[in-house]
Amino acid sequence: MDTNSVFLAFKYVGCIILLLVGLYVPLQALPEPSVSIRQQVSLDSNVMYGNVLASSTLLTTSVDDLSLTIGLRVLEDLRDVTVQAAYALPSSLTLTRGAMEAAAHVGWGLADSSHMDGVLAYAQQLDVGTMVSANLALGIQAHASLIPSLEEPLFNLLPYLRLSLSVAPIDKLFLTTTLSTTTLFEYSAQCWAPVVGIDAAYRFTNAVLVGFSAFVRFSDIHPETVLILSQEVGVYVILQS
């Protein structure tokens, strides 16, 4: 194995360990957190691969108004790690509430290249009774690509947008539609390009929720070359404490 590849592997593993420790230590001083684990298996199709299986794991912990999520996706030679944080802001209103959101993503493993993305945004949620909620988030997202064949990294700064609408038509059933410039592991890089997704989930018990999700990521390169960059359908289970 190339020594550079070994060095990069140790570097990424070391960063992940430091990240986990950095998140774990502060949580020990906080009240009892709620924890959930989401395991998903998906069929993914993109411009690099045909229909291939992808596996993703998400660990989410919430304490009071702070929520932290760590995610890992494995897709053929690709590896993606994402960390997201959201802090709900105080509000005297019952129907709406704001939050500050931040996210960081690293992907590597394809042609010895790596990609890094970051998001900082303000989100506003509107709840209409217990059946309907809408969410709007606006901010900025930064993207950097390190490609061995290029002397300088590619860097771009873009506006960030997320629109979502959630409906609970019957008890324990949740339906969500989303339009966003990013997902947990998919990011616009060269120009603004939307990711459109749907999600349906059913809560069997307080601790178990099973769902189905699908998304289409439109291309952020010239549309005459390719219109859809990637698409995915998957099933998942969430275990909550």
Image (cartoon, helix red, strand yellow):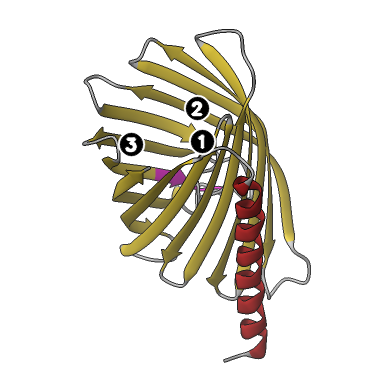
Mark 2–mark 1 CB contact (< 8 Å): yes
Majority secondary structure of magenta residues? strand
- Label 2: state its secondary structure: strand
Q: Is residue 170 left or right of residue 116?
A: left
| Amino acid at pointer 1 | Ser
| Residue 121 sits in quarter | top right
Q: Write the residue at 21% across / 36% down.
A: 204
Point out the stretch of residues depicted in magenta.
216-220
Q: In this rendering, is residue 196 above or below 173?
A: below
Q: CA distance from mark 2 to mark 3?
A: 14 Å
**Label disc, if present, on residue 234 of the rendered structure:** none
- Label 3: state its secondary structure: strand
Q: In this rendering, is residue 221 above or below 172?
A: below
Mark 1 is surrounded, within 10 Å at the Cα level, by few (under 14), some (14 to 19) or many (20 or more) other residues, namely many
Residue under label 2: 163
| Amino acid at pointer 3 | Asp
